[in-house]
Image (cartoon, grey):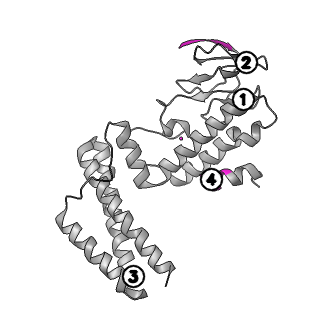
Amino acid sequence: MFRPFLVRAVAAAQATHRPLALSNGYYARAFTDKASSSSSRHSVVTSLTKTCPSCGTILPTALPACPNCNYIARIHASISYHDILGLPYEPNPFVVDAALLKRRFIEAQRVSHPDAWATKNEFQQDVALHVSNTVNAAYKALSSPLHRIEYILRRNGLMIEEADPLEDIELISEIMEVREEIESGDIERIRTLEEDNDNKISEVVSAITKFVAQKNWQETKVAAVRLKYLNGIADALKQRLDNM
């Protein structure tokens, strides 16, 4: 059975190299800022390793968190969410095994959740909160196809903005018609619309998978905008069904 903090974690689901002496006496080879106060000093790893930088023990997850010697370090923003959760980024970062993602998330929270570090010193508790929040952000981004492709596009210098237009005139017309039917259709019609919309989402997801594999980021962004609008329809249909 999961520990209480794991249950909450699942429900909740963002210098120089030199030895750093921490308050409990262990050492880490990490990215260190030049803070004058020991309480404000932070270690930040810029790459992930399979063994603990402090004691050499094989780490239980991809995270810089060692239950053996209580070493823990912040994660630099340059490290991908895939790496944080021990998932492959290449050859196609859009392809994610959902079951493996969930398992790696639970494993990561087991070693990083603040509850697991509640008896440690203030520095370690602060770093654990950072690592746990990063794990939550990674899981949220990778568990949804839309959030996942938005994240991948950001890593490649492209953003999906609220004002990004949908350029497919035919799809625009279909969306407008569906919006009208959502308001007036009976339950059978709403379920039919939901099935049709799910099929459209599957087609767009397949297209995104292909474009990402080709590293065709402009076409990926166009397809991602389509996915955003179709997800909006899916949300509206679900809300309508919930209220019927």
The image's mark for residue 190 is: 3
Q: Is residue 14 magenta?
A: yes
Q: Position of residue 128 (x, y in %)?
A: 68, 35
Up-down relation of residue 86 to residue 98 (above or below): above
Mark 2 residue type = Leu
Q: Secondary structure at mark 1?
A: helix
Q: Which mark is residue 12?
A: 4
Span of residues in magenta: 9-20
Q: Which residue is mark 2?
A: 22
Residue 5 or 182: which is nearer the viewer?
A: 182
Q: Residue at x 24, y 45 (%)?
A: 218
Q: Earlier in the sequence, mark 2 or mark 1?
A: 2
Amino acid at circle 3: Ile
Tag 1: residue type? Gln
Percent across and percent down for residue 203 are 31, 62
Residue ranking furthest to the right: 119
Q: Along the line of sight, which residue is nearer the eye, 135 or 57? A: 135
